[in-house]
Amino acid sequence: MQGNYLITSESVGNGHPDKVCDQISDAVLDAVLKDDPKGRVACETFISAGLVIVGGEITTSAFIDVHRLVRGVLNEIGYTNPVYGFDAHTAAILNAINPQSPDIAQGVDVGGAGDQGIMYGYATDETKELMPLPITLAHKLVKRIEEVRTKKILDYLGPDCKSQVTVEYVKGWPKRIDSVVIAAQHTEKILDKTGKRITDKARKEIIGVVVRPIVGKLVDKNTKYYINQTGKFVVGGPQSDTGVTGRKIIVDTYGGIVPHGGGAFSGKDPTKVDRSAAYVARYIAKNIVAAGIAKKVLIQLSYVIGKAEPLSIFVDTFGTGKISEQKIVELIRKNFDLTPRGIIESLDLRKPIFRRTAVYGHFGNSEFRWEKTDKAAKLKKDAGV
């Protein structure tokens, strides 16, 4: 899109029920990889009022104390007070984990992909993270809510929250923020006399303490703020909504700016290309943009279960490329090993790093290996740009 338009992305905080599940599933994965780097994990979590169910298929030599692990995650998130309707100390936990199917294992053991499907990677030079601006801001807002909650800057905030940012683009590039949406769980402390709405004082505090430090100069007098738009958000978390692993796939990736292949990430070991191929696609896209080959680029990979090499590689630079998409595909084949084994080795994915990916997006965080731009110089040289 090269014209003028509004586009929106959302994010959710670490206490959102779906993100609680993602964190538990990835905590199980990390616990396996810590003691058994080649363990096979496909872990799913379901959470509701007072109940956590952990299931899926896991084949490992490691021992995982699921009950203790789950309570630890809930405690770290902040579900430690009955006032929020869910308590790490009293929640019931059900373990429903089984071994991986041998029919799948026989294709993965020889180095093939752990599933079929399509995976996307994207990068754009509109932010220093080479991520789309709307999702970058949305993540920073919910991360800021967690910060002011845990540091008790605003002591009435609860663990559950969501954000949404609408950005105005002019000629295909971000110009200003049109609107900001915040839904933040809170105690009854900030309700007005009617008991149906938060006070104007609390609304202004949330804008001043949470929103403005993040949005900076991108807001103007016409920017609109929607803070707990229903009036209040006292009942939140698993008390108000069930959670399931893998239900926030757009939050996890690029905020709806580009397509998503459909596969979720959390709870899956790196032989599952839903996760590892999406990571390498981001790695490729970021290095292409960092090399100056394109200002923005979309990468699509496809795999079939049991086969190592991708079935296809598709590239779209949205008219910003300095060389043709066909030549970029040739560069990718030359510089990146796209077999599951090659991806795992190049991105060092056998380590227990995945719990940290389960909130605030899997992309845009410089601590992860797939966010490095160490291939950019070689790509630039090979491309002759």
Image (cartoon, rainbow, N blue to C red):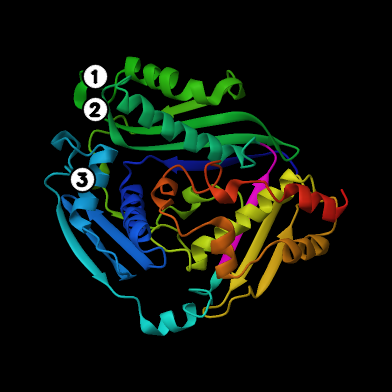
| Distance (Cα) linking label 1 and label 3 | 23 Å
Residue occupying the point 40% across, 53% down: 352
Asked if the residue at tag 2 contacts the one at tag 3, i.e. Cβ–Cβ closer than 8 Å, the answer is no
Tally of numbered tags:
3
Secondary element at tag 1: loop
Q: Quadrant of residue 259?
A: bottom right
Nearer the camera: disc 3 or disc 2: 3
Q: Residues within 10 Å of mark 2 (few under 14, many from 20)?
A: some
Q: Residue furthest right?
A: 384
In the drawing, does residue 357 fall left or right of residue 96?
right
In the drawing, does residue 327 fall left or right of residue 227?
right
Residue occupying the point 24% across, 27% down: 196
x and y percent of residue 374 in the render? 68, 47
Whichever of callouts 3 and 2 sits on the residue coming sooner in the sequence is: 2
Secondary element at tag 3: helix
Residue 78 shows in the view: yes
Q: Residues within 10 Å of mark 1 (few under 14, many from 20)?
A: some
Is 144 in the magenta? no
In the rendered image of this protein, does residue 142 appear above or below residue 218? Answer: below
Is 119 in the magenta? yes
Residue 240 shows in the view: no
Residue marked by disc 3 = 239
Asked if the residue at tag 1 contacts the one at tag 2, i.e. Cβ–Cβ closer than 8 Å, the answer is yes
Residue marked by disc 2 = 196
Secondary element at tag 2: loop
Nearer the camera: disc 1 or disc 3: 3
In the rendered image of this protein, does residue 242 appear above or below residue 134? Answer: below
x and y percent of residue 242 in the render? 27, 53
Q: Which residues are magenta?
A: 118-126
x and y percent of residue 184 in the render? 34, 32
In the rendered image of this protein, does residue 209 appear above or below residue 309? Answer: above
In the drawing, does residue 152 fall left or right of residue 10?
left
